[in-house]
Amino acid sequence: MSKGNPDPPPPRQLPPFPRRAAHRNPKPRPEPSGTSPPVPPMAPPPSVAAAHDRDDPSLRLRRAPAADGVHGEAEPQEQPQRQHEMPCYRASAPAHRRVKESPLSSDAIFRQSHAGLLNLCIVVLIAVNSRLIIENLMKYGLLIRAGFWFSARSLGDWPLLMCCLTLPIFPLAALMTEKWAQRKLIRDHVSILLHIIITTTVLIYPVVVILKCESAVLSGFVLMFIASITWLKLVSFAHTNYDIRVLSQSIEKGATHGSSIDEENIKGPTINSVVYFMLAPTLCYQPSYPRTAFTRKGWVTRQLIKCVVFTGLMGFIIEQYINPIVQNSKHPLKGNFLDAIERVLKLSVPTLYVWLCMFYSFFHLWLNILAELLRFGDREFYKDWWNAKTVEEYWRMWNMPVHKWIVRHIYFPCIRNGLSKGCAILIAFLVSAVFHELCIAVPCHIFKLWAFSGIMFQIPLLFLTKYLQEKFKNTMVGNMIFWFFFSIVGQPMCVLLYYHDVMNRQAQTNG
């Protein structure tokens, strides 16, 4: 080398950056005992390290413990940066940033979870009812009697039992009528007349048997309940098959309605389809139903145990609470007004419990058990009727089999025949009121139209709750009015009225 061109000094070597390890987590090498940890190489400038940390999350995580002082003191230049990154912990940071509602305000109450309040209500109910049970037992003792469910009088109601066993004759007669109409052995108007005779007889026959025999109220109620279900099913069977015949004739003529038609739902009736329909938990006939793949036997056993438990709970409440209250009361329309209010309010809680147990036992447990045994697929037997804000919503959600039947065989046929919606709703309530009166008044041998009036009274409540719901938006005013009139006033009043009328009738009969 010449002296005029000296070699340039070698560049200063910087410690290399560690490779990215976003997807690797190498294990640290164990340090030998008794030795101090090695001194790390010179760190890059803070600005370069911070920029590199922003690009590499793993390095950012590895630098965090050092900043917190776990492995050593934090660098002085990193403290202002941390204070800048966490301004919400400073005393000068605003604590109130947005407009917020209280959790129990009217605008926010339905957007919040109230599981804790529900648990509190359950605890309070258990505590209050435990005290009432102890007080009732100390006052009356144990009043449970086997005669409420199984009495010699009930077992001796052979005419009612024979009437119940002969009811399957009517579905067979309806099937023969449809077979004749399908083969065109009889005309349509003749088949309609035969169906009217069959459906009318299936109601009149049990009514006559119950009124002729001095049977127990419970036996008469069960028979009328089964006869009413049979009537509803036979009406749906006749109406649906008539519409299937009309639709089949239009298909043969090529005058379809322009919509796809499922061939499975326009088949003629068979003995298997009729038997399945009469046993299925539905009131609307169709040739085929959605079916499940198999039957869960263990699930059925558990639901049967629940059904027995809740049925026994109903009997306990009736015998232990309702009977002493009604026996110590006077006729609500003939005695003191304040005494009647006190009896009604005292009776409202046990009748509400009985009604809820009845709903759970029948609509949830029994209908689901029946559906599971028959592999019936559509199990929407009710909706969330407890959230109904109007009486109309309640009647549309609490009993889905009856609601579907009314919509299919009363409401829309009335609309198609030119009637208004209000008139169709009135006819639907009228049919419901008639059957409520038959199922209660006939077994009690009392025809004072209490049940009929109670159902028809729902019509003004329907308009009242609908008006309040439209006036008070996003509130449960209509729901509270429904619960008040239906549970606090309506059911206890009906219990008192029918009890005293039955007692007066039995006194007159024995006298």
Image (cartoon, helix red, strand yellow):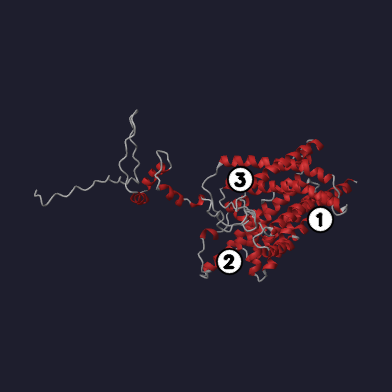
Tell me the mark number nearer the camera, choosing from 1 and 2.
Answer: 1
Disc marking residue 369 = 3
- Residue nearest the viewer, comparing 436 with 239: 436
In screen coordinates, is 122 left or right of 55? right
In whole angstroms, how far apart are the C-alphas of marks 3 and 2? 36 Å
In screen coordinates, is 243 left or right of 67? right
Give the labeled residue for mark 1: 447
In screen coordinates, is 471 left or right of 38? right
Q: Amino acid at mark 2?
A: Val
Q: Residues within 10 Å of mark 3 (few under 14, many from 20)?
A: many
Residue 129: x and y, percent? 73, 41
Q: Quadrant of residue 419?
A: bottom right
Under circle 2, the secondary element is helix
Which of the two labelled residues, at mark 3 and mark 2, occupies the earlier sequence position? 2
* Number of on-image labels: 3
Q: Residues within 10 Å of mark 2 (few under 14, many from 20)?
A: few
Q: Residue furthest right?
A: 511
Give the labeled residue for mark 2: 246
Q: Residue at 42% across / 40% down in the picture?
A: 69
Residue 440: x and y, percent? 76, 52
